[in-house]
Amino acid sequence: MMGYMTANKSNPTLIKTNTEVPLTIAVTAINEKGEKVDKFIACERPLTVYLNWRPIVTLMTLGARAEALALGYLKNQGFISDLSKLESVIVDWDVSSAAIITSETIEDLDEKLSEKTVTSGCGQGTVYGSFMAGLDDINLTTPQIKQSTIYSLLNNISAYNETYKNAGAVHGCGLCQGDQIKGFVEDVGRHNAVDTLAGEMWLNHDFGHNKLFYTTGRLTSEMVIKVAKMGIPVLLSRSGATQMGLELAQQMGITMIARAKGRHFLVYNGAENIEFDAI
């Protein structure tokens, strides 16, 4: 199944292409009583990302919104940065590939590809040498968040996670403004979900200064850096945080909120930015 997206350079937006694939499949399992039960499990499929026909990485993904995933990955890794030079995106599930074609000059690609790190992301994330570049140039806004808004957002986001509710085994990420969810993506790895939202933000000229990023996964260094590159000053998770993730959040001024579920949350950085109006 192939989809083809050509960027409109005067107004580049994400163009829907015919690349839908099933996100879950029906299976039969045996429960603890020895009984057959019909269940759904999440799909997982490889997607090799090509940049100007050169293979960059193979991502294990659920398969939702593959165009945005490939673009967001390349942008977050520092391989591409000029949207006006984007020529096309071709996704072909018959050969499990997403090809991004750009006229942008890509400097030191061999050097960037030689510096590879396998991250702690579930589904095994991979970052390259260019991933850490430019962090000192990121200037995030100082947010003001109400405790009541956090509670309202957590309540609203419970309406999402459709694949997780149906089959489990996936993570979800949400782009939020106030207590409203502007975009939500599920994937087998949280790094894929955040890259997908980053790609959609980039194509739609959306900005992160007034946004909050929600994830069901751990707040690792990779997650903090990707959210910072999206210009988002608040990171919220129902899971925990890592030591390096916290250090980077402190360094870049990201308000980090973890273990957020129901009416419980822990602010690891940026507590001064939260108005505790619903204690």
Image: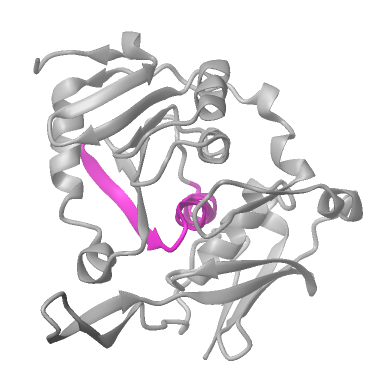
- The answer to which quarter of the image holds residue 132 is top right
For the image, the number of numbered tags is 0
- Residue at the location (46% across, 75% down)? 44
Horizontal and vertical percent position of residue 185: 37, 59
Horizontal and vertical percent position of residue 220: 51, 37
- Which residue is nearer to you in this view: 239 or 140? 239
Query: Is residue 105 covered in magenta?
Result: no
Q: Residue furthest top?
A: 272
Q: Residue furthest front?
A: 33
- Residue at the location (44% across, 30% down)? 209
Report whether 31 appears left or right of 238: left
Question: Can residue 178 be seen by looking at this rendering?
Answer: no
In the rendered image, the vertical position of residue 166 relative to residue 198, given as above or below: below
Q: Quadrant of the C terminus?
A: top left
In the rendered image, the vertical position of residue 214 relative to residue 34, given as above or below: above
- Which residue is nearer to you in this view: 66 or 3? 66
In the rendered image, the vertical position of residue 218 relative to residue 196, given as above or below: above
- The answer to which quarter of the image holds residue 8 is bottom right
- The answer to which quarter of the image holds residue 109 is bottom right
Query: Is residue 201 covered in magenta?
Result: yes
Question: Can residue 276 be seen by looking at this rendering?
Answer: yes
Range of magenta residues: 179-205
Report whether 261 appears left or right of 249: left
- Residue at the location (60% across, 64% down)? 70
Report whether 180 appears left or right of 152: right
Q: How is the image coloured?
A: one colour
Horizontal and vertical percent position of residue 272: 33, 8
- Residue at the location (26% across, 71% down)? 167
Horizontal and vertical percent position of residue 6: 61, 74
